[in-house]
Image: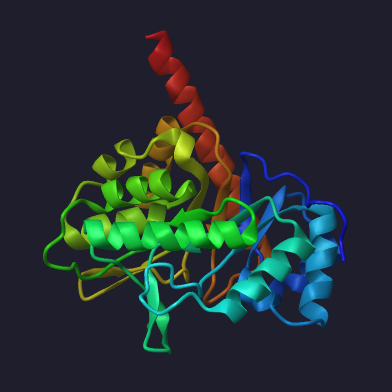
Amino acid sequence: MPATASRPVPAQAGIGLRSAHHDEFLHRRPAIPWVEVHSENFFADGGRQLQVLDAVRRDYGLSLHGVGLSLGGVDPLDPDHLRRLKRLVQRAEPVLVSEHVCWSSADGIFLNDLLPLPYTEAALSHTAARVAAVQDYLGRQILVENVSSYLQFEGAEMTEWDFLVQLAQRAGCRILLDVNNIYVSAVNHGFQAQDYLRAIPAELVGEVHLAGHTVADDILIDTHSAPVADAVWALYRDARRLLGPVPTLIEWDADLPALDRLLAEAARADAEALVAHEQNGADRAA
């Protein structure tokens, strides 16, 4: 078992490392500072996946990104899932650990989706308590990610961004801000993405995600199966102007491209961040 933490995760772009690219990634050792993997893919007691993770973490910063805790659900937190996650965190010693602000199970039935919460005080208190419980169990702070949505609950008592900020403040966690998800939900529901960005305190954001989406019957769907859209790149520049330096991840989970395409998307993210930084400097000088 590794005895030291992974390398740092700097305020630069990394990529989501998927199994289709494991062998090529280990052979080439591309010049990228960090990677993110899905936690649940490394819950096994041994085998090739953990061998890859041990090899990667020696040379790259590491982030673990979970999809199965159902932080907003009403079923009890799964003790076996938590045990496996804690074991993985202790083994890999990642710089960042994250999960989604969503629910994905009910009455013991797990759904293959990350479903949005009702933005009510009751849901906020419930989810904050569960996030705090997860952090206590893991013995470390986590990041929580905003999800995309296609329908909205009636009876909302606050905006999604107010819910997210208050959740982080109450639970003592930080935010993984998915810019594509903001854009998808803004188009689907008719709110202004800029309002969302301006409401997020920069000090709460520990990581940013960028991904591609698809359009079906005038609805945007967060598929992670395409390049980052131009409108999302523009929103990302705005986000970086507001947030300052922050680690940024390129997510691509379906219809995977060649590794070089992922690396090119990460290089563009760094270039867009530089544009945002230069624009901030020009604004201050004006």
* Colouring chosen for the image of the structure: rainbow
Q: Which residue lies furthest to the top in this view?
A: 285
Camera-nearest residue between 35 and 6: 6
Horizontal side of 267 relative to 234 (left or right) equals right
Figure quadrant of the N terminus: bottom right
So how many labels did they put on this image?
0
Left or right of 207? Residue 74 is left
Q: Residue at x 58, y 73 (%)?
A: 256
Depicted 210 relative to depicted 198: above or below: below
In this rendering, is residue 211 above or below 43?
above
Q: Nearer the viewer, residue 172 or 114?
A: 172
The spot of residue 184 in percent (x, y) is 31, 60
Give the percent coordinates (x, y) of residue 96. Answer: 63, 52
**Residue visible at 16% across and 59% down?**
156
Residue at 42% over, 72% down: 223
Residue 281's place in the image compared with 253, above or below, is: above
Q: Residue at horizontal 51%, vertical 61%? A: 133
Pinpoint residue 222: horizontal percent, then vertical percent.
38, 68
Q: Is residue 255 visible from the viewing direction of this image?
A: yes
Could you say where residue 194 lies in the image, as x and y percent from the top left? 27, 41
Task: Give the camera-side residue of 84 and 79.
Answer: 79
Q: Is residue 229 visible?
A: no
* Snapshot quadrant of residue 154: bottom left
| Quadrant (top left, top right, bottom left, bottom right) of the C terminus | top left
